[in-house]
Amino acid sequence: MQFESLTADLKAWLKTSVEGGHGRDALIQSMRTAGYQAEFARQAVELALARFAATAAPAPVAVGEAVAAATTAMPSASELLTETPNAIETSDRRIDILFVLNAPRVILFGNLLAPEECDQMIELSRRKLARSTVVNAATGAYDVHPDRTSSGTHFERGENELIVRIERRIAELVDLPLENGEPIQVLHYTPGAEYKPHWDYFDPALPGNEKVLAMGGQRVATLVMYLNDVESGGSTVFPEVGLDVLPRKGNAVYFAYATEDGQLDRRTLHGGSPVIAGEKWIATKWLRQREYRALPA
Ligand code: PD2
Ligand code: ZN
């Protein structure tokens, strides 16, 4: 492959990103998220590094550092739940803490949702499911992508009495204003469906992320709530730290992206492994630095 044979847009994006100090892995990951095949992405990034790295910023900056540098008050989520009691009482529920990993900060909650709440969320979602998308970091568009083969839907914040109750509970649990939460996304996986490993935070150096970052700043943490028991497969995996969280109805896994020194933590790489038998339903709440407000499409 020749660098010159790439499209003008891709060449321009690679030049800016390399000169901005973004590293090999971050660039390849961004291209993969934008839909390029792995081998093509790897070759294009190598060519761009060979061509532009000499003029790049002196110390290559990892994506996490670049994001942290470009955002303010990033550490808010690293302060979340820094103490680890056995359980947390919110105004309407006692939530168990089943395990804690400190680096990256990952917490498994038991009993976050009642079985009836899980069932209701599934029933309200079932009729409005559509194929899931990912944010294309090059263009900002929401694209269908082979790395994410679930289908899903969402509930507007405060959409109904059930969502109001759950959002209030989450806000108390993580000690962030309810307004910092994105709308709850519900995902449905059938056998074979998966979500390949990715980071949930956005790289602000990529042009397509400008709009999502304008809607409340950087994401600071994820809460994945399991709505059913899965017959086989469908765990949430953290390959950088060898952690596999098995889906159990009513449990939820929380992870915050800031390291102790306020950088974005690349060890929060995570994925939804393929469902082998049965089906998997989850509800995800992403938390932002500031109030989340959607911009018009
Ligand atoms: O389904 C999951 O377990 C999963 C895995 C990775 C969900 C997400 N990411 C997500 O919604 O971001
Ligand atoms: Zn994710």
Image: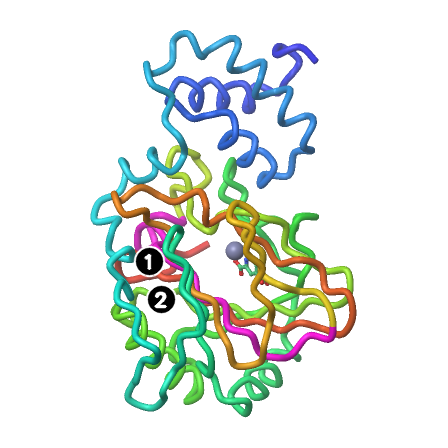
5 relative position to 63: left or right: right
Tag 1 or tag 2, which sits nearer the N-term? 2
* Label 2 with label 1: CB-CB less than 8 Å: yes
Q: Would you identify the image quadrant in which residue 192 lies?
A: bottom right
Which x, y percent locates residue 283?
A: 52, 72
Residue at horizontal 22 percent and vertical 45 percent from the top:
72
Secondary element at tag 1? strand
User: How far across and down, in percent of the image, does residue 243 sit?
Assistant: 54, 56
The amino acid sitting under disc 2 is Gly
Q: Position of residue 162 (x, y in %)?
A: 44, 87
> Who's the residue at 72% across and 73% down the image?
279
Task: Please say if 8 is above or below 237.
Answer: above
Relative depth, front residue between 77 and 149: 77
Kindly indicate the quadrant of the structure image that contains residue 98: bottom left
Looking at the rendered structure, the secondary structure element under dot 2 is loop
* Residue type, mark 1 in image: Arg
Kindly tell me whether mark 1's CB lies below 8 Å from ligand 1. Answer: no
Q: Residue at x 33, y 18 (%)?
A: 59
Q: Where does residue 207 sit, x and y in percent of width and height?
A: 43, 35
Magenta region, residue range: 212-231
Residue furthest toward the left? Answer: 73
**225 in the magenta segment:** yes
Mark seen at residue 181: 2
27 shown above or below 250:
above
Residue occupying image coordinates x 51% and y 49%:
241
The verdict on residue 211 being magenta is: no
Report crowding for label 1: few under 14, some 14 to 19, many 20 or more residues within 10 A (C-alpha): many
Of residues 35 and 53, the one nearer the viewer is: 53
Give the residue at mark 1.
Answer: 288
Q: How is the image coloured?
A: rainbow
Quarter the N terminus occupies: top right
